[in-house]
Image: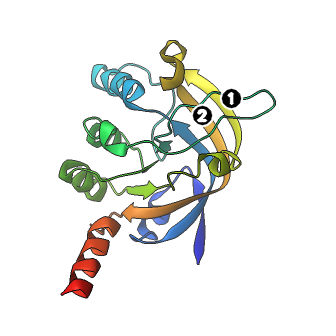
Amino acid sequence: MQKKITSPFNDKTIEGLKAGDQVLISGVMYVGRDAAHKRLVEALNKGDKMPFDVKGQVIYYMGPSPTKPGNVIGSAGPTTSGRMDAYTPRMLEAGLKGMVGKGLRTKDVKDAIKKYKAVYLASVGGAAALIAKRIVKSEIIAYEELGPEALLRIEVKDFPAIVINDMYGGDLYEEGKAKYRKQMS
C-alpha cells in the first residue's frame, strides 16, 4: 500500500514514515545537485539569504535533461545522492526534511537524518520519462548560470518514492542485505 504525503513535510509526516514504505508525494519539491548544494551551504554558513526557505522542504537529486517544447520538464530520473553527502548534514540542520535520489548515504548523513527528524527516499532509476509525467510545474529559482545544475522549484502530483532511511535509524538497503544473507545461509 502506498502512503500519500504532501510536501513540504512536517514532523508528523516524518514520524509516520518507516524504511520500506512506498509513498506518493504531492506538493512542492526543489531540484538541486552538488553545485547548487555547495552554494546553498555557503549561503547558510555566511548567514546570507537563501533562494528558498529550506524548513520542511524536500530536495530531489535529479539528473539533468533538456525540456522538449510543450513539456513541463525533460526526463526526470534520480541522480546519485552520495554526491550531496558533504552538504547534507548542514542542510538538515537548517531544516530540510526530505531528500529523494538513488544510492547509499554515508553514516554522517544517516546520523543527521535521525538527529534532525528527516527522511531519505529513493526514486526508481531508469523510469525518468515516467517520473517526468508526475511533475506538473517547473521553474528555475536560482543559479541559472549553472545550466543543468540550476536550482529548480517543481510541483509534483503522486511522485513515487520508497523510504530508504527513516528518522528511527531504519535503512532499507541494510535490511535488504541482511535478509539476503539470512536466505543464503
Residue at image coords 48%, 65%: 12
The residue carrying mark 1 is 67
Residue at image coords 55%, 49%: 8
Q: Position of residue 42 (x, y in %)?
A: 31, 22
Find numbered disc 2 in the image and state the secondary structure of the residue it sits on.
strand
Quarter of the rendering occupied by the C terminus: bottom left
The mark found on residue 153 in the picture is 2
Q: Position of residue 126 (x, y in %)?
A: 54, 51
Rendered view: 17 above or below 157: below
**Pointer 1: residues within 10 angstroms few (<14), some, or many (20+)?**
few
Quarter of the rendering occupied by the N terminus: bottom right
**Pointer 2: residues within 10 angstroms few (<14), some, or many (20+)?**
some
Residue at image coords 65%, 46%: 129
Q: Single out the residue that lies furthest toward the front.
A: 184
Distance from disc 1 to disc 2, alpha carbons, whole Å, reads 15 Å
Tag 1: amino acid: Thr
Find numbered disc 1 in the image and state the secondary structure of the residue it sits on.
loop
- Residue closest to the eye, 116 or 171: 171
The earlier-in-sequence mark between 1 and 2 is 1
Q: Quadrant of residue 141?
A: top right
Q: How many marks?
A: 2
Rendered view: 41 above or below 86: above
Tag 2: amino acid: Arg
Residue at image coords 42%, 68%: 15
Rendered view: 168 above or below 126: below
- Residue closest to the eye, 55 or 100: 100
Tell me if 177 is positioned left or right of 17 in this view: left
